[in-house]
């Protein structure tokens, strides 16, 4: 592990830097609170981005609001950075009636058209060919939209990844693949996932460039993604950016990493905490003081707690909503089944339970 | 006899067969050092080594494709698909390759691959950790589909599956992975593929169920004079046991967790009415999941749980032509 490279002058506008740092702190706080609520049985499942805030948010902030994000498990926070309000975001996690996606998906699967962040399934890699298709469509329609396609290191093993990379190369699609190499896919280390010397190098085989950046260095991530996005926007085709980072926590609330990895490795990576690194940079540029930090932490915690209190109050989605949105027009089968369900005895919602996933 | 859960029973069956038959290998995501996300392969890599317990890259098509090649070359692979919702990247390998290998080679090649995969909902898993895709595989000629509801059958059926020469989709009902406990004999025994089990005798109606919903059906039949049959093997179906029962009771209900339309319950209903028409005193009842993606918050409204089954069985019992 290298120390982050020294940069004498801020290469990014001050406002962007400060906004990014605030969002990183907010995401860290949110993840910590959600993991606690999960342990208390108030949330069914959670996948945190702890340790990956720079890769998640410094990449997203390099996009324009009209650009689209095809996320994977850990990019929910990008929506918040793009202005999506916290309360409905939390309602998705609680799966209640305040959730725009109607309580149908597991937590950590939020999407909203309002911020151009599309819905992710849980199926690893499936979003990638879709992202390329959206990028092809943007080009065909003559739009200047760029598509950001996020994935984990594990996802690079799926066929969909290779299909997507190939299509992107062949069609010079305006897409930027952003791989969060956090060293683990549940219990499988990246070294067992691929025999390539890096993930970035895979882009070569598909005819476009891949770069590996220090994923815990927000500035490095931002600059690499910005360059790739600008290139895609001006007709230069796709790129792959590998952000080398580390999953500090468990894979998800269902996981116990002590069974398969050495805590010493985690401790080493904690020394390269992306928040600490970024704050160090801001301080060296005279943009941040200790008092700013205290004020921000307090404000963010208050904001998150207030939003939790508000979101958690909302009732469950209506039972009959189960049958909406399967089709644009409900067929007779579903109308009949809805009647049948409403005539059947209701069984209360189960307690939040652990699952593996 | 130890009282075990289904995970322990599966684990024990794998150990027994891996000790007995050096051709048996386990492969999949997180099955090695971690012992599987549901812990079904715990201890295997320590005992049998990394050549026989293989942590694969994250690629289901790779896992099943490689298993087919291994099987053709003489091994007995037991791939694990972490959740049956993630079997679809391997659908091509299963439906077009695995299922048809014997037939298309004129019987020269076979692929004795036993695909273990947790199925079903009720664990707050949402759309992609909850599905019950059995009908897709039953519909595919060449595949056998097994779904035990308890540890005894899980162990015995898995040992049978590992000792015959055709592919098996071995579905493990994860909602009752730990909750369904029962006595399991130590050591070797088998439960035959293709045999249902009459879990409770009765005369007023026949109730057919399998997997996690068997336990819901079991709660629901308590107040009826019902014969409850645990199918255990879905395909090939034990039609004889079913027909015998329905000819006696004249009424039949089928409980299925998967969505209704095109589900296995529909096939069973067709088979039963073809064979039992003169005996039937009521339309065959299907108590199923709805034709919607498996939901997160409203999963108890989706699932055919005991109260809904009871209500339907009451209607079935009271039905007069
Ligand atoms: C197709 C598919 N197979 C398996 C899984 C189970 N699973 C969920 S996350 C995961 C590992 C993902 O690793 P990676 O892509 O590196 O993302 P990370 O979790 O590290 O962010 C696995 C195997 C899944 N969700 N989808
Ligand atoms: Mg990873």
Image: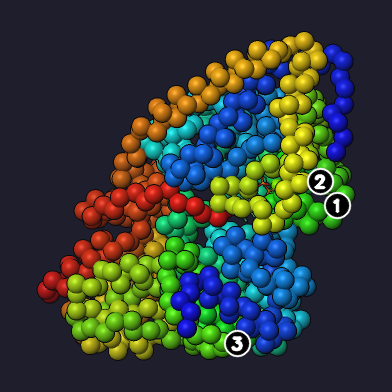
Q: Position of residue A114 (x, y in %)?
A: 52, 27
Q: Is residue A281 visible?
A: yes
Q: Residues within 10 Å of mark 3 (few under 14, many from 20)?
A: some
> Is residue A303 shown above or below A140?
above
Residue at x-position 77% and y-position 10%: A286
Task: Note whether ligand 1 is within 8 Å of mark 3.
Answer: no
Task: Note whether ligand 1 is within 8 Å of mark 2.
Answer: no
3D distance between C-alphas at marks 3 and 1: 39 Å
Q: Residues within 10 Å of mark 2 (few under 14, many from 20)?
A: many
Q: Are marks 2 and 3 in contact (CB under 8 Å)?
A: no
3D distance between C-alphas at marks 2 and 1: 7 Å
Q: In the drawing, does residue A354 fall left or right of residue B228?
A: right
Residue at x-position 28% and y-position 73%: B253
Q: Circle 2 is placed at which residue position?
A: A199
Q: Circle 3 is placed at which residue position?
A: B164
Q: Circle 1 is placed at which residue position?
A: A196
């Amino acid at each position: 592990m290298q120390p982050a490279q020294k940069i004498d002058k801020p290469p990014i506008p001050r406002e962007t830097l400060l906004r990014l740092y605030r969002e990183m702190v907010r995401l860290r706080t949110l993840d910590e609170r959600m993991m606690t609520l999960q342990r208390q049985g108030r949330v069914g499942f959670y996948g945190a981005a702890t340790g990956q805030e720079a890769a998640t948010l410094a990449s997203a902030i390099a996009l324009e609001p009209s650009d689209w994000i095809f996320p994977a498990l850990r990019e929910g926070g990008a929506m918040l950075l793009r202005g999506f309000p916290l309360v409905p975001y939390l309602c998705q996690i609680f799966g209640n009636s305040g959730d725009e996606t109607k309580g149908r998906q597991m937590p950590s699967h939020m999407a909203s058209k309002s911020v151009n962040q599309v819905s992710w399934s849980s199926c690893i890699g499936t979003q990638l060919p879709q992202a390329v298709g959206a990028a092809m469509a943007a080009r065909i329609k003559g739009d200047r939209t760029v598509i950001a396609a996020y994935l984990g290191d594990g996802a690079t093993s799926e066929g969909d990844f290779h299909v997507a990379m190939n299509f992107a190369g062949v069609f010079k699609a305006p897409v930027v693949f952003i791989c969060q190499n956090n060293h683990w896919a549940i219990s499988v280390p990246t070294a067992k996932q691929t025999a390539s010397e890096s993930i970035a190098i895979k882009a070569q085989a598909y005819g476009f460039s891949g770069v590996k950046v220090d994923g815990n260095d927000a500035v490095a991530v931002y600059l690499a993604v910005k360059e790739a996005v600008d290139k895609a926007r001006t007709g230069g085709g796709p790129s792959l950016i590998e952000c080398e980072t580390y999953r500090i926590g468990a894979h998800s609330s269902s996981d116990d990493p002590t069974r398969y990895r050495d805590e010493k490795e985690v401790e080493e990576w904690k020394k390269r905490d992306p928040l600490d690194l970024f704050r160090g940079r801001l301080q060296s540029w005279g943009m941040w003081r200790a008092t700013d930090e205290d004020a921000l932490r307090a404000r963010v915690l208050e904001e998150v707690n207030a939003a939790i209190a508000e979101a958690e109050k909302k009732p469950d989605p209506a039972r009959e909503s189960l049958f909406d949105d399967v089709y644009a027009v409900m067929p007779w089968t579903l109308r009949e089944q809805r009647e049948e369900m409403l005539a059947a005895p209701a069984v209360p919602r189960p307690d939040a339970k652990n699952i593996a996933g | 006899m130890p009282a075990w859960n289904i995970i322990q029973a599966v684990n024990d069956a794998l150990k027994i067969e891996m000790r007995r038959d050096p051709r048996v290998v386990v492969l999949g995501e997180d099955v090695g050092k971690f012992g599987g996300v549901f812990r079904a392969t715990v201890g295997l890599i320590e005992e049998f080594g990394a050549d026989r317990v293989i942590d694969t890259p994250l690629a289901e098509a790779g896992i099943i494709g490689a298993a087919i090649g291994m099987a053709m070359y003489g091994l007995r692979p037991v791939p694990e698909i972490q959740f049956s919702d993630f079997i679809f990247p391997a659908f091509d390998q299963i439906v077009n390759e695995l299922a048809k290998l014997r037939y298309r080679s004129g019987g020269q090649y076979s692929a004795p691959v036993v695909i273990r995969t947790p199925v079903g909902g009720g664990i707050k898993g949402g759309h992609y950790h909850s599905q019950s895709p059995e009908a897709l595989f039953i519909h595919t000629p060449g595949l056998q589909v097994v779904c035990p509801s308890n540890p005894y059958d899980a162990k015995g059926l898995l040992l049978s599956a590992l000792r015959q020469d055709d592919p098996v989709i071995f579905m493990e009902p994860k909602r009752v992975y730990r909750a369904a406990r029962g006595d399991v004999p130590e050591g070797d025994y088998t439960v035959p593929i293709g045999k249902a089990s009459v879990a409770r005798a009765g005369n007023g109606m026949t109730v057919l169920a399998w997997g996690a919903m068997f336990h819901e059906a079991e709660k629901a039949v308590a107040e009826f004079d019902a014969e409850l049959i645990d199918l255990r093997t879905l395909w090939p179906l034990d039609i004889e046991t079913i027909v015998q029962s329905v000819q006696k009771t004249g009424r039949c209900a089928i409980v299925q967790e998967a969505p209704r339309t095109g589900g296995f319950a529909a096939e069973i209903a067709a088979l039963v009415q073809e064979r039992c028409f003169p005996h039937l005193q009521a339309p065959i009842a299907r108590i199923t999941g709805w034709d919607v993606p498996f939901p997160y918050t409203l999963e108890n409204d989706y699932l055919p749980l005991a109260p809904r089954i009871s209500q339907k069985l009451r209607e079935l019992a009271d039905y007069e032509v």
